[in-house]
Image: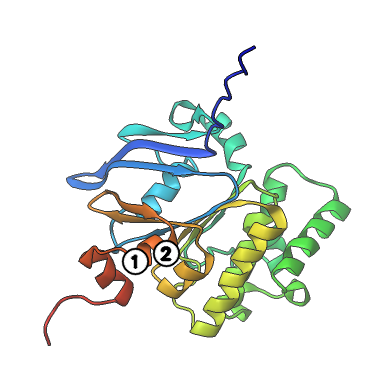
């Protein structure tokens, strides 16, 4: 008797031939990428290569000019806005600079996604907010306003808000930008903690190479609107490509 054929598991997220232009500027020119359940994929590359644009396509905030994004085999690019809202509840998003509401307290900022999703029970909201803030070690700051927080604390509040809905995937857009090395290490550890605690898939944009080698399971290098390199951190470190080595080392190639 012949054993039944095992069907390959559908990747969590797949990006096929994604293209996006803004006027005459061709930002994405055919991005192909696969993201597996539970992994941390780090996106690197020069500024202006479309990393943030790619994230916004993955969460459905932008529509491509061509190509598609699939989540569990479903083409997000064909969904209507109401259907996309359901998809977005499966994802958390940490915007650049955290994008907190200045008129809301820390606790109110973190609770915001749950209220938008229709959660009204006060006890449940308080419990979920406490859980999220406890994970980022900010419970004692729940009544503060964002203006009274440091940059690193604002990022941690943003992480708490991103994970309060218990998402399957969290997207981090430059979570350590503008932070000192010690605070950067704290944020990196928070990202690892979120992955371990919730078994989430993480997609992280960063220009900090120390963060790349600390948190990444896999690295994708974007250049000229396509994926120029896709591999493990060790494969990146040992790549013979001079452009990759210059990027890792922060060498511009210019002469003084």
Rendered location of residue 56, percent (x, y): 44, 47
**Residue that extends furthest to the front in the rendered view of this protein:** 1
Give the SS element for disc 1.
loop
Q: Residue at x 64, y 11 (%)?
A: 1
**Residue that extends furthest to the top in the rendered view of this protein:** 1
Q: Nearer the viewer, residue 42 or 83?
A: 42
C-alpha span from label 1 to label 2 = 6 Å
- Is the residue under label 2 in contact with that under label 1 (CB below 8 Å)? yes
Q: Residue at x 40, y 54 (%)?
A: 231
**Residue that extends furthest to the bottom in the rendered view of this protein:** 256
Quadrant assignment, res 195: bottom right
Number of marks in the image?
A: 2
Check the picture and name the quadrant holding the C terminus: bottom left
Residue 154 visible here: no
**Residue that extends furthest to the right in the rendered view of this protein:** 123
State the mark number for residue 10: none
The residue where tag 1 is placed is 238
The answer to whether 69 appears left or right of 188 in the picture is: left
Rendered location of residue 191, percent (x, y): 60, 64
The residue where tag 2 is placed is 234
The answer to whether 198 appears left or right of 23 in the picture is: right
Q: Nearer the viewer, residue 29 or 36?
A: 36
Looking at the picture, does residue 134 appear above or below residue 254? Answer: above
Rendered location of residue 115, percent (x, y): 72, 48
Give the SS element for disc 2.
helix
């Amino acid at each position: 008797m012949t054993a039944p054929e095992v069907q390959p598991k559908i990747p969590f997220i797949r990006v096929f031939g994604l293209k996006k232009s803004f006027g005459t500027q061709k930002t994405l020119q055919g991005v192909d990428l696969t993201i597996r359940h539970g992994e941390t994929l780090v996106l690197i590359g020069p500024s202006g290569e479309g990393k943030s644009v790619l994230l916004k396509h993955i969460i459905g905030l932008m529509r491509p000019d061509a190509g598609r994004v699939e989540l569990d085999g479903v083409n997000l690019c064909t969904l209507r806005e109401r259907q996309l809202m359901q998809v977005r509840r499966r994802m958390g998003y940490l915007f650049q600079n955290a994008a907190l509401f200045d008129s809301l307290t820390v606790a109110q900022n973190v609770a915001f996604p749950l209220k938008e999703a229709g959660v009204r029970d006060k006890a449940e909201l308080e419990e979920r907010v406490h859980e999220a803030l406890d994970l980022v070690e900010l419970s004692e700051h729940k009544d503060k306003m964002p203006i009274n927080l440091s940059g690193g604390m604002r990022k941690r509040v943003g992480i708490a808000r991103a994970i309060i809905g218990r998402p399957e995937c969290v997207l981090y857009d430059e979570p350590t930008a503008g932070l000192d090395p010690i605070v950067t290490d704290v944020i990196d550890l928070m990202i690892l903690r979120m992955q371990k605690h919730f078994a989430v898939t993480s997609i992280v944009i960063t220009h900090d190479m120390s963060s790349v080698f600390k948190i990444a399971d896999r690295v994708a290098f974007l250049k000229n609107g396509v994926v120029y390199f896709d591999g493990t951190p060790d494969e990146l470190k040992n790549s013979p490509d001079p452009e990759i080595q210059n990027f890792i080392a922060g060498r511009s190639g210019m002469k003084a």
